[in-house]
Image: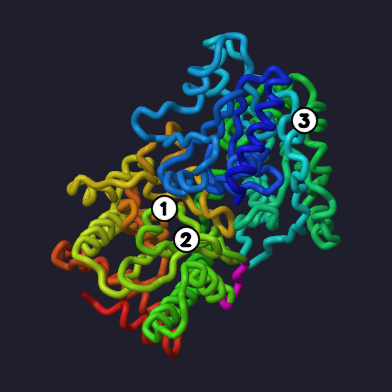
Amino acid sequence: MNNAAEVNKRVESLQAFMVRNNIHACVVFTADPHMSEYVPEHWHLREWLSGFTGSAATLVITQDQACLWTDSRYWEQASAQLNNTVYQLMQHGMSGVPDPQRWALSMLQSGQNVWADASTMSMQAHSIWISCLSEHGINLVTEPDITNAIWKNRPGLPQNHIYVHEKPFACRSVSENLQSIRNEMTNNKCQWHVMSSLDDIAWTFNLRGSDVSYNPVFLSYAVISHTDAWLFVDSVKLNSSVNSYLRNEGIRVKAYSQINEFLSNIPIGNTILYDPSRTSLALFNSINHLEKIPCINPSQLIKAQKNNHEISNIRATMEYDGVALCEFFSWLESELSDGSRTITELTIDEEITNARARQPNFVSPSFSTIAGFNANGAMPHYQATPENHSVITGNGLLLIDSGGQYLGGTTDITRVVPIGNISDQQRTDYTLVLKGMIALSMARFPKGTKGASLDSIARMPLWQHGLDYGHGTGHGVGYFMNVHEGPQSISPRQQVGDQYQFKSGMVTSNEPGLYRPDKWGIRIENLVLAKPVEQDNTFLEFETLTLCPIDTRCINKNMLSYEEIKWLNSYHDQTKSRLAPLLSGRAYDWLLKRTAHI
């Protein structure tokens, strides 16, 4: 992390550049040209300018002020990392806090200029900003190139090798994927489709890479017509085997840098499908001469509905992950009981990754492990560092949110365990969160239901006590792909459109929480699969996929209903029956102990 003096120096340099170039405000997104959640270092301008390392934030910098917007997951982290800098923290989502556009308008006058990087501004964001600014006569400009002008030692583009995702883990052929996409192109009366989102491209061509932390994707673009498909990628990433594979699949390869030129040369009069939330302004400018159909990438909805072979692989992957977690938690309890070794939040990150790495088909973590003890657990996306972390000692609650990328699936799980003695209030909080998680696990709902309708089910036990949490309840999860992957989600922020309806085969997290600032945090998370109700095919229900005991030592049993206790005991029976044959020794004994009925 950059120190405050260095951050302030960089902001001053930017502001001087703005004055020289008649720029009155600068907008910096957390984004790359592919609208990725996790951004390669080459596009870490927001972090470089602010020192804030969270995964979501927007900067607006005027010639004499600087503000950073981030949501409730990061308020405490941002407050600490922005301390002594010129930045004002704007708590996005808090009542009375203006959004970045409205704040910028309050600082500017008609005729002035707002700069944004066209390559990292989605068309969705562009639409929001341009509608606000144009109403007040303020210009949105994308020149000159501020990033390269002020960031002299900017990291280069990642050049990691691409590999083929092969059978039995790849369960759909490239030709099947392309045909599914082309069917949607036909339905939308489109001759062309451009993709810049990396998960869609990797899925379509059954390829994987490591250009983006935690997500097995690679920098690329793709263009699909009804007869051909082009992959735009740097040739250094392709070995002879992958080149041969692409030739056999009929995929034409062009340089990563040739995408704009290629799109510009598609003849006028053609129609192209693009996703506004996943297409940059720079890329859009290359198709401005074409008839354009804005639509969610067809591959988003297709790959969200896992097929039977993928579901089978995911279930097997959950067993591998469950074995790793049993080995880890049994190790943790043993070490804490022994007391001879200092265990920190960093130790937990290291050991849980090591446990997964011993399992078949493991590739990498699916995100940076969150291990938060007591007050650190109250920050939903807390990240321990060598400079700032806690030792696991004394009394309290330890929250561990972690996941793995395996060839046969992606995992994400959160558990909270007691350290020493815990209070009655902590038990009450834990049980309320558990009640919400169980309620959503048992939910049945009509096909076509959207996540906003499901979200309140998990919150109801907390709401009844005047409590709530700031994040969504669940996010879609990819298949050996992004751990956060839509289009579906379980969130109070209603999304408009049929593409956000829940459908059979969708894998989603179920993770209500409760956070007491400066005290403790609780989140309990399983992944669940939407599937038809056997007795009524017009309804869906959830199958819990994750296999790991939920710590019953934190429960106030008197707060649970008969049905809730029955669900928990049944879940533990399933976890034990599937994991016990794969375990031995300390981990086996731990599993039996932690799955005992309450």
Check whether the beta carbons of the residues at disc 1 and disc 2 lie within 8 A of each other. Answer: yes
Our reading of the magenta stretch's main secondary structure is: loop
Write down the residue under mark 2.
Answer: 370
Q: Which label's residue is closer to the chain start, 1 or 2?
A: 2
Label 2 packing within 10 angstroms: few (<14), some (14-19), many (20+): many
Kindly report the distance in space between the C-alpha atoms of the residues bearing marks 1 and 3.
Answer: 41 Å
Q: Is residue 35 visible?
A: no
Judging depth in this view, the residue of 434 and 189 nearest the camera is 434
Secondary structure state at the residue bearing disc 1: loop
- Quarter-wise, where is residue 6 in the image? top right
Q: For this view, does 324 lie left or right of residue 494?
A: right
Q: Residue at x 39, y 61 (%)?
A: 526
- Where residue 59 appears, x then y in whole percent? 56, 33
At which x and y percent is residue 27?
A: 60, 29
Q: Exactly how many numbered labels are in the figure?
A: 3
Q: CA–CA distance between discs 1 and 2?
A: 8 Å
Q: Where does the magenta region start and end?
A: 358-363
Disc 1: CA contacts within 10 A as few (<14), some (14-19) or many (>=20) = many
Helix or strand or loop: what does disc 2 sit on?
strand
Q: Secondary structure at mark 3?
A: helix
